[in-house]
Amino acid sequence: MRFYEYESRRIVERAGIPVTDYGFATTAAEAGQAAERIGGPTVIKSQVLTGGRMKAGGVRFADSPEQAEADAAEILELEIGGHVPVGVLVDPKAEIEQEYYAAVLWDGRAKRPMMLFSDMGGIDIEQVAAEHPDHVGRGHLSNLHPIADFEAKQAVARCGMTGSALNRASAVLARLARLQRDYDMTLAEINPLARLADGSFVALDAHMEMEDEAVGRHKPMLHEIGVDLDEPRELYEPSEFERNVKAIDAADHRGVIQGKDHGFHGDLGLVIGAGGGSLTLTDAVRSQGGRPANYAEIGGNPSVAKSKGLAIEVLRKDGVEKIAVMMSIVSNTRVDIVARGVIKACLELGKDPAETIAIFRIPGAWEEEGYRILDRYGVEYCDRSVSMWEAAGRAVARVQGDRTGSQ
Amino acid sequence: MSVLLHEDFTFIVQGITGREAVNLTRECLDFGSAIVGGVTPGRKGREVHGVPVFDTVEQVVEHHGSAPDGAVVTVPPAFTKDAVLEAIENGIGLIVVVTERIPRADVAQMVELANERGARIIGPNCLGVIVPGVAKMGGIGGPARDAAKAYAPGPVGVMSRSGGMTTEISSTLTAAGLGVSTAVSIGGDAIIGSTYAELMPLFDADEQTEAIVIYTEPGGRMEAELVDWRERAGSELPIVAFMAGRFMDDEEMQGMSFGHAGTIVEGKEDSATEKIARLEAAGIPVVERIDEIPAAVKQKLGAAA
């Protein structure tokens, strides 16, 4: 789960990490009032779940509350990468002595969280790590033992820091490490972390991501910071196809269907599964010149209605005349049930299954029953002796045959 | 021989009274596996296909006379960590975690405790382990009759991030007359108990295994770890790889997850292109078509002989 900057700011603040005297506003008037309260020059930042705000004009500097209000009015109207801002963050323009970088994230290879700290903050940490490796301190954390303060201090000291800055920065990193563990963050990052003229440290910008699987156990905290759990937080707006497939899946607990069409622009509908099989088949279609109209996953023995629902949604997509129904060998999902579902989908849409289903290749449990049904409707199918690659190739050839035939 | 499982291997099923677990128990028994007990808290005294059910792992150990060799864990995500810790602390050495959607921190805790106690975890989000003709531990391959059809005994070890593709690949090897020594569905999550590199020493030491096939996907650094291990260990066991999800390299797919939780391209190193280049540079051919796998294995075996 991704967070808006103002939510990340609240999460960091709750964890005892100092932040600026910021304000969150959903109207221009509120933004003006926040700037008035803060006093002095402010920064107005668009609250969107996407990068590139600065370039898009979503960050402005205001000298007065009036200016802040005017800037906020414009930013609130400005779409960035297709996202409408949910509000603006009003921040005092801080007098910064130095910028640092602090983060805690998963190291999949070590299977442990890793702390990262640098005294070269504000810029891309990967660039710092490549060009100035001695300015990046790292430290792995145990998953079982309590997080000790000295571990954070070691990581900060490893980038060459000393003096009171070392002690103050270590306290921030230790709190960030506990926050990452306590709230199942896949990324807990403060960049920049700033040292002000009086020697104190404040988080100027924070970026938090919570693991989706763990959201359920952090509802009290999410509620406290005002997160609406029903609001979608995708990288992009879900399409009608994606919303419909999701609704069909949710309506019935038997089996799972998923569908995505973001980034797919082709004419061959895919009714495919399961996890790895779908990846393999999508590649096989594309590598043989096919153009998938979507990505899909069938798994866990869905009902006839669910299989039918997925096939209907795929067939209703613009430009899709044919679907390929394919999976790797199944042991849990029943072949006959999927066969029944996709044939029903064709019939309900007034289409001929034999013409519409370019290929059916699902070997495994109850396959004989499945093949009998497919035979009855004259649908082309194959068993496990035909590879996934070959089956995908046949589907592509049939769609291409249509294309040349209609020219 | 084989790896992980053997003729006399005994195991338990935690969460045995669940719908999926009941099926899995039937399938494993039919395949010849020795399931010596099941655990579902509060259901002591029942039986599932003749397997006695207990409230705790401790009670099964007492009933059996010693700690069984393994445990299959198939309980809801919120209870999985506890079930795995219970298995480890009761002396069980091999734990197959079937459950999916477990938070990463829970997985990391189980794995760290397993390492401290000398236990091994396979999964989570996996279908388990199968030794053709001997035993299977988990839903891998499905009902015994189907599993026997796809998995014939042979010289090839299979490791796969996808459960379904473990069977598809093994079936291809079986159809080509090669067969499988041991197949492991290692799980599709970002953090798993046993990676390719962590299982390789077992296959490397196994007399039956003459080649390895891995199924892999974008996301994570497991392939780099495999390449590093191979160099460090000086292993000459031939490996053939199949990479699915090449389409995810498209710019429009950045940051999107497909298929498995761990399958997401977050940086350049995670991408299919980068992984293929890394594997091939290390002498591990990456085939594009599933049906090219047997020929690639035979070529490697021919070169080794």
Image (cartoon, grey):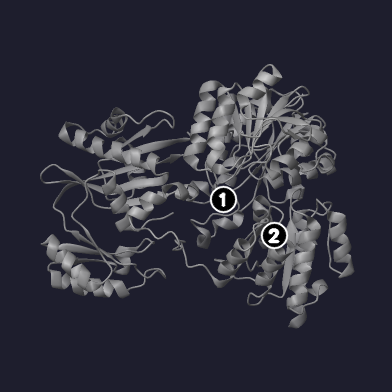
Instruction: From this view, report whether residue B196 is shown above or below residue A211.
Output: above
Mark whose residue sits in front, 1 or 2: 2
Q: Could you tell whether A296 is left or right of A361 in the image?
A: left
Of the pair A384 and B62, the residue shown nearer to us: B62
Residue B273's mark?
A: 1
Of the pair A406 and B304, the residue shown nearer to us: A406
Q: Quadrant of residue B152?
A: top right
Same-chain status of marks 1 and 2: no
Q: Could you tell whether A39 is left or right of A349 in the image?
A: left
Give percent across and percent down for residue A6: 30, 58
Q: Could you tell whether B260 is left or right of A1 in the image?
A: right
Residue A175 seen anywhere in this rendered image of the structure: yes
Chain for disc number 1: B
Q: Secondary structure at mark 1?
A: helix
| Residue ID at (36%, 72%) | A79
Callout 1–callout 2 Cβ contact below 8 Å: no
Residue at label 2?
A272
| Residue ID at (59%, 46%) | B276
